[in-house]
Image: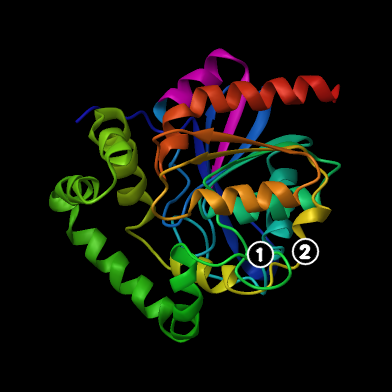
Amino acid sequence: MIDIDRPQIEGSVAVRQGRRIGFAEFGSPHGRAVIWLHGTPGARRQIPLEARRWAGENNVRVIGLDRPGVGSSTPYRYPSVLGFADDLRIVADALGVDQMAVIGLSGGGPYTLATSYAMPERVVVAGVLGGVAPTVGPDAIDGGAMGLGKYAAGVLEVAGAPIGRTVSSFIRVARPIASPAIGLYGLLSPRADRQLLARPEFKAMFLDDLLNGGKHRMEAPFADVVVFSRDWGFRIGDVTVPVRWWHGDRDHIIPFRHGQHVVDLLPDATLYPMPGDSHLGGLGMATDILTELMSVWDSTGR
């Protein structure tokens, strides 16, 4: 297993109601800011090593955030996905970020769209990698992991927090078997994800993120499922920020047709199919994705 350097800066920011949001910074401290929103599950260090190096070489400041209930963030369940945008605004102000790009993987996708909707004056461009689609309301589509999550949401409303604490307790004592566990997940995944998880740098990144983000608390994934199963608090068609969406056409968790559906609803969006890739494929293209988003930023003149 390869060694992973610690983030250049890591800490937490006070937000509303006495809560805190954890963050980790990579790349150039004075570069254009990219807010990176992790998947479900995940935490602030779920950023590919290639993306971290690329950011440092290209004057880009990548900031990973913990969602409430994982890593250094206080447990909290938003009334809707849109509620996250208020917290991100406070974090951005505290970190001196005026304008930004936002990237969301999987469960980070809804929060990326919510932030873009709420702060079009600050979010220059958004990128989504295999993002979750709405399950209720006029923008809804059925199937995929959230097809099951919608039915589990009622149980998780009550049991999500204690389940998360149990998972955290297990992670604290399971460090020796964490690497084999990720390998086992890879064996059970489609070939494209299996190949990505077999790469030492990606396995090391996932282990570092899991063991650092999940050992204190792991309530965020269950809160995500509950919030995703509600109305998101905005309509997809009202997101005016340019969105670039990458989706594997063999995604076994969030079907490719979900990406097509959301992109069709967005007024300014481009879908980039990833032939043969599954759910984690976007992570393997992180530098290409960052390059594209910075190119879109340049084209806006902002």
Marks 1 and 2, how far apart in space?
A: 9 Å
Q: Is residue 11 above or below residue 132?
A: above
> Mark 1 — residue?
81
Question: Where is mark 2, residue-wise?
Answer: 234
Q: Which residues are magenta?
A: 50-65
Residue drawn at point x = 42 percent, y = 47 percent: 251
> x%, y% of residue 194?
26, 40
Residue at x 24% of width, y 29% of height: 200
Q: Is residue 242 above or below residue 254?
A: above
Residue 13 visible, this orientation: no
Badge 2 marks a residue whose secondary structure is loop
Residue 286 lies left or right of residue 121; in this view the side is left
Residue 213 on image: x %, y %: 39, 52
Asked whether 137 or 96 is in front, the reply is 137
- Residue toward you, 197 or 189: 189
Q: Residue 76 at x, y = what percent? A: 56, 71
Instruction: Give residue 110's quadrant in the image.
Output: bottom right
